[in-house]
Image: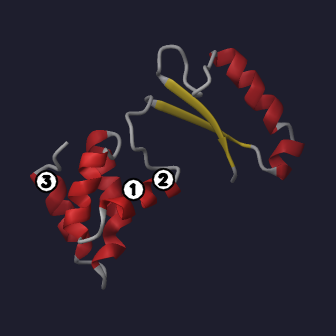
Amino acid sequence: MVISAEARARIEAEIEKYPRKRGALLPALHIVQGEFGHVSAETARSLAEIFEILPIEVMEVISFYNMFFDAPQPRYHVHVCTNLPCALRGARVLLRELEQHLGVDQSGNTAGGRIHLGHEEC
């Protein structure tokens, strides 16, 4: 996937806001993901060229933050916090009930691939 001229211009505008070019990487990832729905390896290589860094550095950022995806995703994401305070309030029971109600598979996606159910910490 090639980054569009419009997205590239928006990324360049973001870069101008930061003293170091790399400071605009997160906003650039949001721009690209907004355009494609995820950040593919090819798009990460394009971003790496723009930011003059290695593609693996872009992929490290994508894999670190749960708001970025390296593959196409379902339209809806439902996340239940399962850290200790939330678990004590029944979050794990809620998660299991949602899994049964939605009929999610091992990947956390519904059969139609429209909803992803996952857990995280708040």
Check disc 2 and report the residue beneath it.
Answer: 63
- Residue 6 is tagged as 3
Q: Few, some or many C-alpha atoms within 10 Å of disc 3 (few <14, some 14-19, many ≥20)?
A: few
Q: Secondary structure at mark 3?
A: helix
The residue that appears at 17% across and 50% down in the rendered structure is 3
Q: Secondary structure at mark 1?
A: helix
Residue that extends furthest to the right in the rendered view of this protein: 88
Looking at the image, residue 28 lies above or below residue 103: below
Compared across the picture, whether 30 is left or right of 99 comes to left
Q: Is residue 32 left or right of residue 89?
A: left
x, y (%) of residue 17?
28, 78
Question: Looking at the picture, how far across and down is residue 47, in whole percent?
Answer: 25, 60
**Image quadrant of residue 50?**
bottom left
Q: Is residue 67 left or right of residue 53?
A: right
Residue located farthest toward the left when viewing the structure as drawn? 5
Q: Are marks 2 and 1 in contact (CB under 8 Å)?
A: yes
Q: Position of residue 99 (x, y in %)?
A: 69, 22
In this rendered view, identify the residue nearer to me: 74 or 55: 55
Q: Which residue is tagged 1?
A: 59
Is disc 2 placed on a helix, strand or loop?
helix
Give the residue type that dot 3 points to: Glu
Q: Is residue 55 above or below residue 79?
A: below
Q: Earlier in the sequence, mark 1 or mark 3?
A: 3
Comparing labels 1 and 3, the label whose residue is closer to the camera: 1
Q: Give me the residue at 30% from left, 85% from top.
A: 19
Q: Residue at x 30, y 47 (%)?
A: 41
Q: How far is disc 1 from disc 3 in space, using C-alphas?
A: 22 Å
